[in-house]
Image (cartoon, helix red, strand yellow):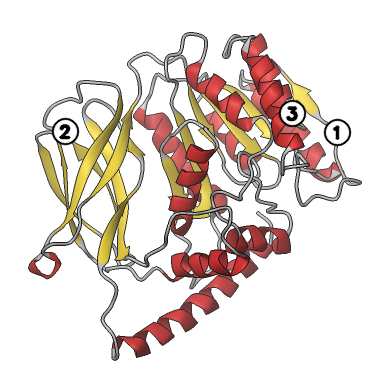
């Protein structure tokens, strides 16, 4: 993971500490904002579901608008980072005839696998009703946490990174990445060209089965609403969002362990389901995915890695990883753009060949619009070769 991400953690920590100190002083003069529950997208089976979310003050962040100024976006970003939680909040979760009381941690996060008294009757999204428990919160608004039960027999599942895989984030450049996080919103952030159509094709597969897509990212939960809104606005299939708590008092370490743990949890939840893994070359995705191929033999159909301006040394390292993946019976494709990965998927029968036309058109539309490049923030003179290795 780029070293600057640790610096960003320290910078954000100082910013949040200053905001909280100022907030403590203001508490003596004004009432605090009311608390509310933010329910995160989870997943499950017929017998249990993952319920997670956070209890924090309602900062009054309004829906994103492309006309919002940099100043407005900055203020909203700071409100998200500041996000005063309700430590150890008690939350009542209900779905069907099942009810359970969950207890949040000191940062207001709650997360628990909830057993179901009766199986979910249908595939698709199901709302888990959430309510704060306690006399102090009488009248507090309730919320819902959507949980996905995949179809009974999907062809495969997809696990995808977000930053510089779906969402242009420029994680190789501190200045560009900071600007995107602080000065842009869900309506001004850009996808990589062709991604939306490719993910719709993966979701539908050959028979429109609704193959589930799980988005696993090291982005903080503070950006949950931005990412969820972005996916909807770009017509990218909805899926469980698995982000992380940026412990800003400590630097952003453990990126690989975090993603590996969350992906392994998904694999274990659906022990017979094969997966396609999608990531990029800038972080640890190839290493994480290669290890998963080893740990779960026969479960990974393919690994797609977006080449985000990889230096020759990085390309060489990824080339070595492809040998590990192929030896384990899978395949790894490192491609400069979305269409190359889509062609590979079509050749193997995972998406219909007819979808390639839509993906190509989507890519052209994206490139001719505001997004002019396929690898933002990367020196175009420093690139590694595209690597394609199959079984």
**What is the distance, in whole Å, between disc 2 and disc 1 at their CAs?**
50 Å
Figure disc tally:
3
Q: Whole-percent x and y of residue 41? A: 36, 42
Mark closest to the chain's N terminus, 3 or 2:
2
- Which residue in the structure is indicated by mark 1? 385
Mark closest to the chain's N terminus, 3 or 1:
3
Q: Which element is circle 2 on?
A: loop
Q: Nearer the viewer, residue 60 or 131?
A: 60
Nearer the camera: disc 3 or disc 1: 3
Q: Whole-percent x and y of residue 11? A: 59, 74
Q: Is residue 109 above or below residue 97?
A: below
Q: Residue at 12%, 27% (x, y): give it.
A: 118
> Dividing the picture into quarters, in which one does residue 264 lie?
top left
Identify the disc placed on residue 120: none
**What is the distance, in whole Å, between disc 3 and disc 2 at their CAs?**
46 Å
Outermost residue to the front: 67
Mark 2 Cα shell of 10 Å, populated few (<14), some (14-19), many (≥20): some
> Dividing the picture into quarters, in which one does residue 314 lie?
top right
Identify the disc placed on residue 116: 2
Q: Is residue 182 left or right of residue 126?
A: right
Nearer the camera: disc 3 or disc 2: 3
Task: Assign the N terminus to one quadrant of the image.
Answer: bottom right
Q: Nearer the viewer, residue 124 or 184?
A: 184
Mark closest to the chain's N terminus, 2 or 1:
2
Q: Is residue 58 left or right of residue 359?
A: left
**What is the distance, in whole Å, between disc 3 and disc 1 at their CAs?**
23 Å
Query: Visible in this render: residue 109?
Result: no
């Amino acid at each position: 993971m780029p070293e600057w991400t640790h610096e960003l953690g320290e910078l954000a920590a100082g910013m949040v500490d200053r905001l909280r100190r100022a907030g403590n002083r203001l508490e003596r003069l004004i009432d605090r904002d009311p608390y509310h529950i933010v329910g995160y997208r989870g997943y499950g089976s017929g017998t249990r579901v993952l319920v997670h979310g956070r209890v924090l003050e309602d900062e009054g962040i309004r829906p994103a608008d492309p006309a919002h100024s940099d100043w407005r976006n900055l203020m909203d970003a700071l409100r998200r980072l500041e996000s005063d939680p309700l430590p150890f909040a008690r939350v009542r979760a209900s779905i069907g005839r099942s009810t359970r009381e969950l207890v949040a941690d000191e940062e207001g996060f709650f997360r628990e696998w909830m057993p179901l008294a009766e199986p979910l009757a249908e595939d698709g999204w199901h709302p888990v009703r959430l309510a704060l428990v306690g006399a102090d919160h009488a009248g507090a608004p309730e919320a819902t946490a959507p949980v996905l039960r995949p179809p009974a027999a999907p062809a495969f599942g997809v696990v995808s990174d977000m930053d510089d895989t779906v969402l242009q984030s420029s994680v190789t450049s501190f200045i560009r990445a900071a600007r995107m996080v602080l000065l842009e919103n869900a309506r001004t952030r850009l996808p990589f060209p062709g991604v939306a159509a490719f993910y719709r094709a993966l979701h539908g597969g050959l028979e429109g089965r609704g193959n589930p897509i799980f988005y696993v990212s090291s982005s903080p939960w503070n950006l949950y609403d931005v990412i969820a809104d972005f996916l909807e606005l770009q017509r990218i299939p909805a899926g469980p969002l698995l982000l992380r708590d940026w412990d800003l008092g400590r630097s952003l370490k453990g990126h690989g362990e975090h993603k590996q743990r969350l992906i392994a949890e998904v694999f274990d939840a659906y022990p017979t389901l094969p997966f396609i893994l999608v990531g990029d070359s800038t972080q640890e995705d190839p290493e994480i995915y290669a290890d998963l191929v080893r740990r779960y033999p026969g479960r990974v159909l393919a690994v797609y890695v977006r080449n985000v301006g990889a230096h020759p040394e990085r390309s060489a390292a990824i080339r070595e990883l492809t040998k590990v993946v192929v030896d384990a019976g899978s395949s790894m494709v490192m491609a400069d753009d979305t269409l190359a990965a889509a062609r590979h998927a079509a050749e193997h029968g995972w998406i219909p060949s007819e979808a390639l036309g839509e993906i190509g058109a989507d890519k052209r539309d994206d490139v001719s619009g505001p997004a002019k490049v396929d690898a933002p923030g990367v020196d175009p003179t420093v690139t590694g070769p595209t690597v394609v290795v199959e079984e």
